Amino acid sequence: MTARTTRLDDRVRSALRTVGAAAKRGLGDADLAELVQIRASQLNHCAFCLDMHLGLAREQGVGMGVPPVERSRDWGRRLDLLAAWEEAGEVFDARERAALALTEAVTVLTEGFVPDEVYEQAAAHFEEAELAHLLALIATINAWNRLMVARRIPAGSTQW
């Protein structure tokens, strides 16, 4: 294998962090933001981002208003089933399912565009500003995934 750079310009890193933080704030749902970032990272096979966002999700331990005693169990189950969210029944609510479908459509772009039905389903669950922030979050995590995968930055690396 050819040696790959670990270098990433500080201005690029800062800009991506700023966009991601703004998108998360605008979305206003920390749980959903982590689910979206983890799902995109699964699809893109980004070990670095999966390691980081799964760690953050477990650390936050938040889970849709679940009482603190049950929080970690519920959140852990949702993380465990995320790769199979479509088959997970009521583990994910309709809003989350719409966001995850949009995440997959934007990330994979199999048909070269996001299908109207996927976009319309998301639009039914998110106000226009929230939807704009969700799309920005999906685009940002995809940019991070591609930067890390292209350079083969391993999980847990401090050199990136």
Image (cartoon, rainbow, N blue to C red):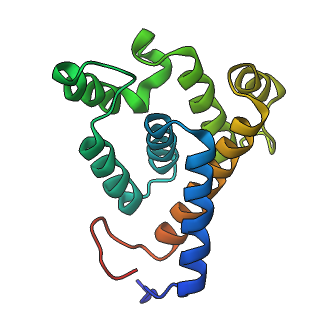
Looking at the rendered image, the quarter that the C terminus falls into is bottom left
* Residue drawn at (52%, 40%) of the image: 36
User: How far across and down, in percent of the image, does residue 102 sit?
Assistant: 66, 34
Q: Which of 154 and 23 is in front in this view?
A: 23
Q: Is residue 56 placed above or below 87 in the rendered structure?
A: below
Name the image quarter holding residue 63.
top left
Q: Is residue 59 placed above or below 72 in the rendered structure?
A: below
* Residue drawn at (31%, 19%) of the image: 66
User: How far across and down, in percent of the image, does residue 152 sit?
Assistant: 42, 73
Name the image quarter holding residue 1.
bottom left
User: How far across and down, in percent of the image, does residue 25 sit?
Assistant: 57, 48
Q: Nearer the viewer, residue 102 or 65?
A: 65
* Residue drawn at (52%, 46%) of the image: 40
Q: Nearer the viewer, residue 50 or 31?
A: 31
User: How far across and down, in percent of the image, does residue 71 sit?
Assistant: 24, 25
Q: Is residue 155 placed above or below 87 in the rendered structure?
A: below
On the rendered structure, is 24 left or right of 64? right
Residue extending farthest left:
69
On the rendered structure, is 14 left or right of 1? right
